[in-house]
Amino acid sequence: MKNLFFALLLTVGFATVAQADVFESQQDPETSYIRPGPRPAPYPGNPRPDPYPAPNPRPNPPPAPYPNPYPPGGNARYEYVNCESWNYNYQECYIGAYGVRSIRIYNVFSYDACLYNQTFGFYNDRIWVNRGCRATFEVLRVY
């Protein structure tokens, strides 16, 4: 038991001396393990990534479609229909099916997106809107 106690005492005694030597050498810039200064440059095969990369630029929006170079004939007219989805509820707006050649969005006045077959569409004689889409629709009729 005495030998164990004596070995433990020697170990603790030398550990404090060794620790003091490590702390003293860290304070001395000539022998410190942590060297001050700039970080070394990355080696050519593995460049270090930029810690603050520049954000990706927004993609350019697609160009606006050209106006129709072939306007409708003399017996055609445009009608404008407001159809609105209040409180994100489904709503249908009657337009009458006779002579409808095309339907398109003329103006969107909601903050929510109006996406074809997702938040608006048409069938037979109606335009339907849903999920907050509020827009003016242009209906081309030919008589």
Image: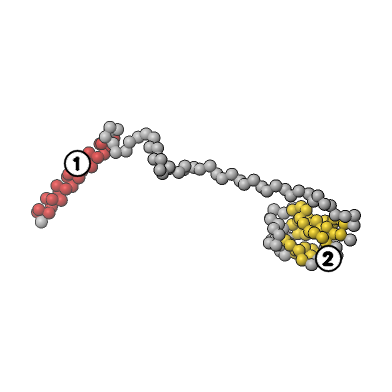
Left or right of residue 73: residue 91: left
For label 1, the residue is 17
Residue at position x 26%, y 39% in the image? 23
> Can see residue 72?
yes
Q: How is the image coloured?
A: secondary structure
Identify residue type, mark 1.
Val
Residue 14 x, y percent position in the rendering? 17, 44
Identify residue type, mark 2.
Ala
Q: Around disc 2, counting alpha carbons within 10 Å, would you say few (fewer than 14), some (14 to 19), or many (20 or more)?
A: few
Q: Which of 135/117 is in front?
A: 117
Question: Can you say which quadrant of the picture contains the C terminus?
Answer: bottom right
Work out which residue is located at the far bottom of the displayed protein and give it: 124
Left or right of residue 1: residue 83: right
For label 2, the residue is 97
Left or right of residue 129: residue 49: left
Residue at position x 71%, y 57% in the image? 114
